[in-house]
């Protein structure tokens, strides 16, 4: 799974990425600070399943903090996109192509309205962040359309002559964008397009098809960033009202990054996504006291910085992935004594057999049954697993 972080220049996108990953990247308030895509690991937050057994997990990848387990997710941060990106403005085509393999997108928006459409500073509140949603949707839709239309006439002519199903051919044409045959069939049906006569489709119908495929293959949510700034909350409420079909979550990447850095330097004890932190260092200077005081007030008022909420929402709500843990009945440790060392983020319809194949091809090929470690009851190969399940796979040797 790969989650893409997108947005216009200077919206706080790279700050969000660093706050989520603590990756060593350049952050500056000017357009195109990011040129090459940044790729790093962020973490979603789930309950540590070992706690209910009186133990603590020993993750092979990720970490445990208190009763929470943080599970790795691949994130990619591409350079800021500007209007006309799909036509190559601001190196837009190159930046868009960096998103090819993303499964979902987090659109970071400066909800305070202090950055114009080009990523330039303007008076706070003078720019309407709702315009950013419309702009990015249009750029992404035309990006898909441009790829779909490459060699369109020849593509359609061969399709008709060879009598191949249009959805199958379209999957091949857009495979780099993770478009599937099922997505193509769904789009054609919803839009009432004649799949046998694609040569008769209008420009608007082609754009509508590109938009539907983009929405299915790159589901997107909005991170309403800079929510700690003046007027931001009013703009956030307006965004939610204007775009009811979007998941919109307010956040402050700057405050989250400050907390992560303070935690890294043992100044505070902080669990990402929580509404409070504990100061560990006594000899703070006045600037540190004021900064932590401001953050504490924000957390008390808003519940969290929102960054962890955005990541969890993208994985568990937008993509509907589930955390599934391999384990054994009566023995949660692996051969090295590590408790529940692995966690896999799996698609929503994952069955016991599919999970067995995920663990090892031989487990899938020689599958006998699976056992729910909590209930100690066997489950069949077609049983759809639930979020947080701990599963033991039984297979022939």
Image (cartoon, helix red, strand yellow):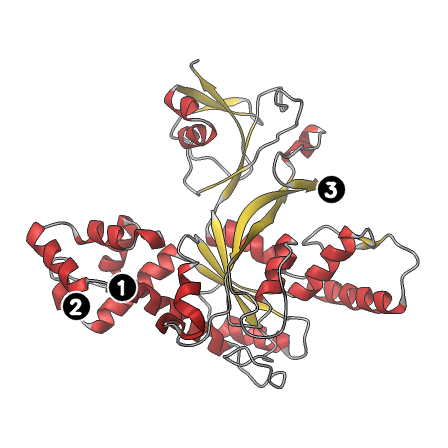
Asked if the residue at tag 1 contacts the one at tag 2, i.e. Cβ–Cβ closer than 8 Å, the answer is yes
- State left or right for residue 135 relative to residue 122: left
- State left or right for residue 148 relative to residue 269: left
Residue at image coords 26%, 62%: 148
- Of callouts 2 and 3, the N-terminal one: 3
Percent across and percent down for residue 110 are 58, 73
Residue at image coords 47%, 78%: 131
Percent across and percent down for residue 92 are 42, 69
Q: Dot 2, crowdedness within 10 Å: few (<14), some or many (≥20)?
A: few
Q: Quadrant of residue 306?
A: bottom right
- State left or right for residue 316 relative to residue 16: left
Q: CA distance from mark 2 to mark 1?
A: 10 Å
Q: What's the mark number on residue 26?
A: none
Residue 364's place in the image compared with 234, above or below, is above
Task: Look at the numbered disc 3 and give the secondary structure of its residue.
Answer: loop
Q: What's the mark number on residue 201?
A: 2
Task: Look at the numbered disc 1 and give the secondary structure of its residue.
Answer: helix
Asked if the residue at tag 3 contacts the one at tag 2, i.e. Cβ–Cβ closer than 8 Å, the answer is no
Residue 328's place in the image compared with 181, above or below, is above
Identify the residue position indicated by label 3 in the image: 66
Q: Residue furthest left?
A: 161
Q: Dot 1, crowdedness within 10 Å: few (<14), some or many (≥20)?
A: many
Identify the residue position indicated by label 1 in the image: 209
- Of callouts 1 and 3, the N-terminal one: 3
Percent across and percent down for residue 219 are 42, 58
**Foreground residue among 54 and 197:** 197
- Of callouts 2 and 1, the N-terminal one: 2
Q: Quadrant of residue 353?
A: top left
Q: CA distance from mark 1 to mark 3?
A: 47 Å
Residue 308's place in the image compared with 201, above or below, is above
Task: Look at the numbered disc 2 and give the secondary structure of its residue.
Answer: loop
């Amino acid at each position: 799974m790969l989650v893409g972080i997108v947005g216009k220049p200077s919206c706080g996108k790279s700050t969000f990425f660093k706050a989520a990953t603590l990756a060593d990247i350049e952050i500056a308030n000017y357009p195109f600070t990011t040129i090459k895509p940044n790729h790093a690991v962020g973490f979603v937050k789930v309950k540590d399943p070992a706690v209910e057994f009186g133990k603590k997990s020993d993750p092979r990848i990720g970490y445990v903090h208190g009763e929470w387990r943080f599970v790795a997710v691949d994130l990619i941060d591409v350079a800021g996109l500007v209007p006309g990106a799909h036509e190559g403005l601001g190196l837009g085509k190159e930046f868009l192509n960096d998103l090819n393999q993303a499964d979902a997108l987090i659109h970071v928006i400066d909800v305070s309205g202090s950055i114009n459409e080009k990523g330039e500073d303007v008076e706070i509140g003078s720019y309407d962040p709702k315009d950013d949603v419309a702009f990015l949707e249009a750029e992404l839709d035309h990006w898909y359309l441009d790829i779909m239309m490459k060699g369109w006439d020849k593509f359609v002519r061969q399709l008709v002559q060879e009598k191949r199903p249009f959805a199958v051919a379209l999957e091949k044409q857009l495979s780099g964008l993770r478009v599937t045959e099922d997505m193509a069939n769904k789009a054609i049906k919803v839009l009432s397009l004649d799949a046998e006569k694609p040569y008769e489709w209008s420009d608007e119908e082609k754009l509508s098809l590109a938009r539907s495929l983009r929405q299915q293959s790159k589901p997107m949510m909005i991170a309403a960033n800079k929510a700690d700034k003046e007027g931001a909350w009013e703009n956030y409420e307006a965004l939610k009202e204007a775009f009811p079909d979007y998941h919109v979550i307010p956040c402050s990447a700057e405050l989250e990054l400050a907390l992560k850095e303070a935690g890294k330097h043992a100044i505070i004890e902080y669990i990402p996504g929580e509404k409070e932190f504990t100061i560990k260092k006594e000899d703070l200077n006045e600037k540190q006291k004021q900064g932590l005081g401001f953050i504490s007030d924000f957390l008390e008022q808003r519940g969290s910085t929102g960054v962890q909420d955005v990541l969890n929402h993208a994985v568990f709500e937008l993509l509907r992935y589930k955390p599934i843990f391999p384990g054994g009945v009566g023995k949660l440790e692996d051969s090295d004594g590590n408790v529940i060392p692995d966690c896999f983020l799996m698609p929503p319809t994952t069955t016991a057999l599919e999970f067995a194949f995920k663990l090892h091809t031989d487990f899938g090929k020689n599958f006998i049954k699976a056992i729910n470690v909590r209930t100690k009851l066997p489950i069949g190969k077609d049983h759809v697993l639930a979020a947080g399940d701990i599963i033991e796979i039984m297979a022939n040797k």
